[in-house]
Amino acid sequence: MKTGYVNGILLDGTENMVPQKDKMVITEGSKIISVEYKDKAIADGTYRECQIVDLNGAYIMPGLINMHTHLASSGKPLKARSKKDIKKITSLMSSNPLTRRYAMGQFQKNAETELVSGVTTVRSMGGLSDLETTLRNDIATGKVEGPRILTCNMAISVPGGHMAGSLAYEATSPEEAASFVRKLVSQGVDLIKLMVTGGVLDADEEGEPGALKMSPDIIKAACDEAHRLGYKVSAHCESPAGVKEALRNGVDYIEHGAKPDQEMMDLFKEKGAALICTISPTIPYVFGDPKITGFTEMEQNNCRTVLDGIISCARACLEEGIPVGLGTDSGTSFTTHYDMWRELAYFSYYCGVSRNFALHTATQVNAGIAGLGQVTGTIEPGKAADMIMTEGNPRNDLEALRGMYMVVVRGKLIREPLLDKVDQIDKLVDRASVDVRKNTEDHEELEKILENEDIDENARREILDRR
């Protein structure tokens, strides 16, 4: 049966979207089949053919797309463990049917959390064994509920590299890197991921986060083999040297980013690569109370360097017309699977874009970067019925996305999406994000001033610049 969503305010996901009232979004099965005025639908009889869902004035928009998640973990902070311990734990979890079933349950729970928070598509960027392709297929065939998943399963690293031996294979040569690519392709992955640099917690010294770990010949061998087989390659990069080597040797997506220069921007454009901006995991490290987070002063300072690199890289890419997508890196410590709204708020605040553009990026832009531009990302006929509804207007306050009124994924309606939140994390990150939240309050005050028709034109122009 057709379903008609009425009495909502439509934000269609396009770059210049404006709120549209009196529109009726009609779905059938997993697709949107029509977007038309309610009065027209009543007049031509379409309304009577539909099961009606009254949105009671809520805002209706495309489902969010999270371009960087880790479904293997929840975001709850773990007690300090050595890399050797982490390798043992991940090896155990994939070693027998019982532990694999437990791990799959955790993956599924985290994916469901993304969904009820308004994320209808996730790109999972480093998991355990082949569990994520299995979960992706179970969701796609309706065995379990969850968002659309694009996954790389395990990443490819090198000895001593980021997540080596736990969530990433260790390639010791170009030939072995190419063989890992073939292994992943045989599992049915959607893309390949390389760990080109280390991460913040891998650094042994202050001032050296994201040190280059993977040699150019290994990067090139993996990219060449992936491209030969028709797959794109993503790379974890948190230093300028890492970003440049990744781009020179064939990487299609840079995850995170680093302080840019013109050479880096030229490489992005020459290779047709995109940047995935991930501000969320840096905020607790840099601004969180170290008595709660347990992060050392060195880790905080290194993460500040990474945060500055991510922001400056995203800003430069936007200025140069290079595609920039958004992901949360959820699953890392203090970064949950229900806080995609924060990444939009950080992107707006730190990168100087409008809330409208942040919402557009998390929907249509992300869909295009992920290769799903013909599938999802906007509300229009022919696209998947992936939609979210909020009581507040995210164009005025992105925190309206913090709780969903309704969620629709591939045509299935979730009327009362409920989140299992972690108060300890929410309180910590809310305090760490006080400047971002204050900016929202300032924006609302500016909106009230702009509503005054008697405002001086020069003052109006100044306010619009501040927005």
Image (tube, grey):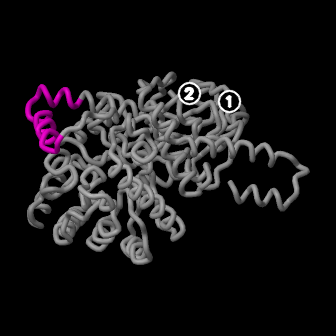
Q: Foreground residue, 415 or 197?
A: 197
Q: Which residue is mark 2?
A: 405
Horizontal arrangement in the rendering, residue 377 relative to residue 293 (left or right): right
Q: Counting residues from the N terminus, which is met first, the one under dot 2 or under dot 1?
A: 1
Q: Position of residue 460 (x, y in %)?
A: 81, 56
Q: Position of residue 110 (x, y in %)?
A: 33, 32
Q: Quadrant of residue 148?
A: top left
Q: Which residue is mark 1?
A: 57
Give the amino acid type for the residue marked by disc 1 in the picture. Gly
Q: Quadrant of residue 226?
A: bottom left
Relative to 210, does residue 167 appear above or below in the rendering? above
Give the amino acid type for the residue marked by disc 2 in the picture. Tyr
Assign the magenta stretch its main secondary structure.
helix
Relative to 186, does residue 42 appear above or below in the rendering? above
Name which residue lies at 59% across and 35% down.
400
Q: Could you tell me which secondary element the residue under label 2 belongs to?
A: loop
Q: Position of residue 407 (x, y in %)?
A: 50, 31
Please state the extent of the stretch shown in magenta in the rendering: 82-104
Relative to 114, does residue 378 appear above or below in the rendering? below
